[in-house]
Image (spheres, grey):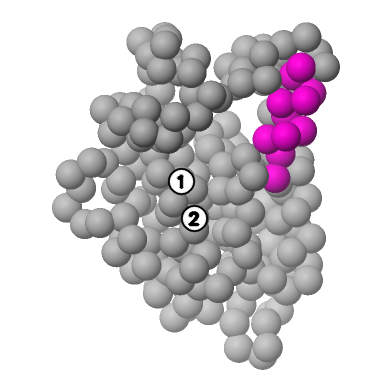
Amino acid sequence: MTTVLGTSTITLALVAGYAGSGKSEAGKILASATGWAMLDKDTLSRPMTERLLEALGGDPDDRHSPMYLEHARPLEYACLMKSVWENLECGISVVAVAPFLAESADAQWTARVGRRCGRIGARFETLWVDSDLESMRDRLISRDASRDTWKLTHWPEYTSGIDIERRPVVPHHVIDNRIGASRPLAEQVESVAQRLLEDA
C-alpha cells in the first residue's frame, strides 16, 4: 500500500455537482480539513477555455453550446485529470473539483479511474454536493460570474436538463447544500474529512 510519510493512504476525492451547488466551497473546506491538494477545473483551465472559444469565433463565456461541449470541455477535464494523476503519483492526495456530471454517471469512466487509483495505491472517493434549483439559482446570482449569464437568462431551458435526483454510479458521500439544510456545509464536509482521515 502506498503511504505518505508512512502513515496515510493517498486519496483522490472528487467533489461533483451542478453549477451553483457549492462544489468549490465544499472542495476548499475538504482540502483545508485534510491538507490535501485542491485542484479546481475552472481555476486550472478557464483562461484556456475563454481564449479557445474566442479563437473558434465563439463566446468566451459559453458553457452550453456544441462548440464548448465538443472542443473545450474535453480539454478542461484532460487538464484537470493530468494534474490529478501527477499529484497522486507523487504521493500527494487530491481534492478534484468539477461538475463531473457525465463522468460520475459513467460506469466505464469511474471504473478506469478506480483501476488507475488501485495501481498507485490510492483510494477513490466521491462527494456529491446536492442542492435544489432555487438554492443553485441564488448562488449563481450571488457569484455574478459572466459564465453563468446564459444559465440565468435561459433558466427554464437550462434547468430542463437538470436531474435533481442524479447521483454518481459509484459509492459516494452526499453533502446537502440546499439553503435551509439541517446541517451547515462546513460541518458536513468536515465530518466526511474526519472519516476519510480516520480510515487512511
Horizontal and vertical percent position of residue 31: 52, 65
Could you tell me which residue is drawn at 78 percent across and 50 percent down? 82
The relative height of residue 46 versus residue 154 in the rendered view (above or below) is below
Relative to 13, say whether 170 is above or below. Answer: above
Q: Which residue is mark 2?
A: 27
The kind of secondary structure element at disc 1 is: helix
Mark 1: give few (<14), some (14-19) or many (20+) Cα within 10 Å.
many
* Chain part drawn in magenta: 44-54
Instruction: Identify the main secondary structure in magenta.
Output: helix
Front-lying residue, 59 or 68: 59
What is the quadrant of residue 64 in the picture? Answer: top right
Q: Amino acid at mark 2?
A: Gly
Q: Secondary structure at mark 2?
A: helix
Give whichever of 107, 67 is nearer the camera. 67
Report if residue 156 is visible in the image.
Answer: yes
The x and y percentages for residue 75 are 76, 33
The residue carrying mark 1 is 23
The residue lying at 29 percent from left, 64 percent from top is 187
